[in-house]
Image: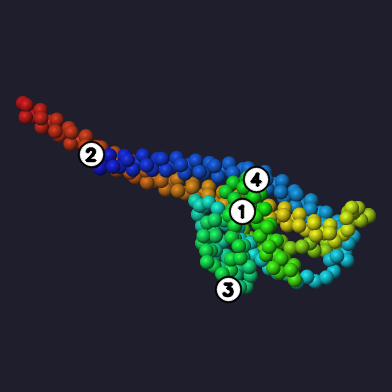
Amino acid sequence: MSKRRDLETQLRSLNEIREIMGAMKNLSLMEARRLTRFLETQRRVIATIEAAAVDFSLFHTELFLGEEIFHDLHLVIGSERGFCGDFNDSLLRYLDNLIPLPGESSLVVIGGKLSAKLSGDSRVAAALNGAGVVEEVDSVLVKLMETLTALGSDAAKSTLRLRVIHHDPTEQSIKVSELRPFKKAGAATARFTYAPLLYMKAQPFLSGLAEQHLFAALHELLYSSLMAENQRRVEHMDAAVRRLERRSAELWQKRNVLRQEEITEEIEVIMLSVEALA
């Protein structure tokens, strides 16, 4: 009987764990649905800024003639929370292939779980906490912009070119997105006959527009990474719940076997008692 009770205790524990994991899975599904709306809005913002940049560049070609010297900075977006499978480990493998040696490029890491794995790495110039839910993205972005401004001032002689290593939720793979100042529109056809009417000089306007584009693009990438993280967490929780269900079924079967043995023993004891009385 003690064995059966031990199995029943294990079954109760597994059921509780399964309920917790099921709740975590549902929360991740809800978060992914919310992020879908945020991503759609943010992508429309980026498309509007890029269209304005094209219109501007067609009438101010003199601002796009010089060849710029770029200072590369890599940004890796990991997870702040766990239970998302190999989300961070796959980023580490990709990063080691992209930047195998220290000193080749500065590295900014976002996400507590990923930062812990890169603790003591000489490639890391800064490490920031990541977002666990969509409401935390804005505060993360503010700290990131402050960090980028500080690192950019150290390389004032060159233009910052940011390469963002992140998970893409659409392609289900790791992607490198390059963020850099606007290029000349090239063969694009002007949508308007006259140049855009500006209330400030062209160069400050271009600098401000580039800053707004960088802010919006980083916003979109943080949303995308958080979306991919929640997708991976749903997959991880789903697999864990299935394993728990299989384990519960095995324990339940063992529990039934033990219960049948106990019933058989009880019947034998009753029969022996009847024979003794007879």
Q: N-terminal of the two: label 3 or label 2?
A: 2
Q: Amino acid at mark 4?
A: Thr
Q: Nearer the viewer, mark 3 or mark 2?
A: 3
Q: Amino acid at mark 2?
A: Met
**Which numbered disc, 4 or 1, marks the residue that appears first in the sequence?**
4
- Of callouts 1 and 2, the N-terminal one: 2
Q: How many numbered marks appear?
A: 4
Residue drawn at x 48%, y 42% as measured from the top left = 22
Residue at 6%, 26% in the rendered image: 277
Q: CA distance from mark 3 to mark 2?
A: 61 Å
> Which structural element holds mark 3?
loop
The local secondary structure at tag 2 comes to loop
Amino acid at the residue labelled 1: Ser
Tag 1 near tag 2, CB within 8 Å: no
Find residue 1 and name its label. Answer: 2
Measure the C-alpha gap from mark 1 to mark 2.
51 Å
At numbered mark 4, what does the secondary structure look like: helix, strand or loop?
A: helix
Q: Position of residue 278 (x, y in %)?
A: 5, 26
Which one is earlier in the sequence, the residue at label 4 or at label 3? 4
Q: Which residue is disc 4 drawn over?
A: 36
Residue 160: give x, y in percent of width and height. 72, 66
Q: Please, what is the three-letter code of the amino acid marked with disc 3? A: Leu
What residue would you read off at disc 1? Answer: 225
**Which disc is residue 101 wearing?**
3
Please name which of the two marks, 4 or 1, marks the residue nearer to the observer: 1
Q: Looking at the image, is mark 1 or mark 2 nearer the viewer?
A: 1
Q: Is residue 273 above or below residue 247?
A: above
Q: Residue at position x 88%, y 58% from top?
A: 201
Quick one: label 2, few (<14), some, or many (20+) residues within 10 Å? few
